[in-house]
Amino acid sequence: MCFWYGKNTVDKMRDSRFIIEHLDNNPHNCSIENLAFAHEELNKAKAFSYDKTRPELIAKVAMNIYKNFETQEFEINLAFNQLYTLTLDENNTNKTIPLNALFLQYPNDFEIVLHNANFIATSLKRELSLNIDGLNCYSYKYEVAKFLTAPPGKTLPSLVKHNGNWYLILNEKSRLLAIAPSWKRKTLV
């Protein structure tokens, strides 16, 4: 953080009881998108809520929080290990889209991001649908899931090259743990 924000800023934040938050709870991951300043009370709340619930969800969804250093905005991203759909209303008709990933954009307010992350985790843990309109995100993007069918009597390996593209085949042996934030991806809607 001293490298990106300067030692004076880091010292001022520490004097105000802010800590350097590792968003994925891994103290060895010091990539800039994994670091944010958080008040020590908010850090404790995260430790006893989001940090405990997130690993329980991995069979269903890989959930991560990132911070974009350039814009200072946060993003919650969800990479689905099980079928999950997004229903959109287009021209008074519901359209259901299978999701590979969902990217929720937030302003620079970690308290709101953490509150929404806990709400999302609880909803997904209880297998409830997620109402994006009920969140405080200002925007979202998504990546449509692609499906491959195995030939009759065969199973697909964990990695498959199809039409020149590589695909990870998700099953009980291979799951997503994290995916890059939206600003590092190209195939979003």
Image (cartoon, helix red, strand yellow):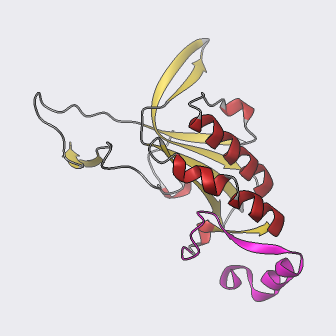
Q: Residue at x 66, y 66 (%)?
A: 70
Q: Residue at x 71, y 42 (%)?
A: 137
> Residue 35 in the image: x percent, y percent?
65, 70
> Residue 65 in the image: x percent, y percent?
62, 56
Q: Does residue 183 appear left or right of residue 106 in this picture?
A: left
Q: Is residue 25 above or below residue 142?
A: below
Q: Is residue 39 above or below residue 173?
A: below
Q: Which residue is nearer to you in this view: 145 or 14?
A: 14
Magenta region? 1-29
Q: Does residue 134 appear left or right of residue 78 in this picture?
A: right
Q: Residue at x 78, y 82 (%)?
A: 10
Furthest toward the bottom, the residue is 7
Q: Is residue 96 shown in magenta?
A: no
> Residue 175 in the image: x percent, y percent?
37, 49
Query: Which quadrant of the view contains residue 38?
Result: bottom right
Query: Which quadrant of the view contains residue 156?
Result: top left
Q: Does residue 111 appear left or right of residue 148 in this picture?
A: right
**Quarter in which the N terminus is drawn:** bottom right
Q: Is residue 149 above or below residue 163?
A: above
Furthest toward the right, the residue is 16
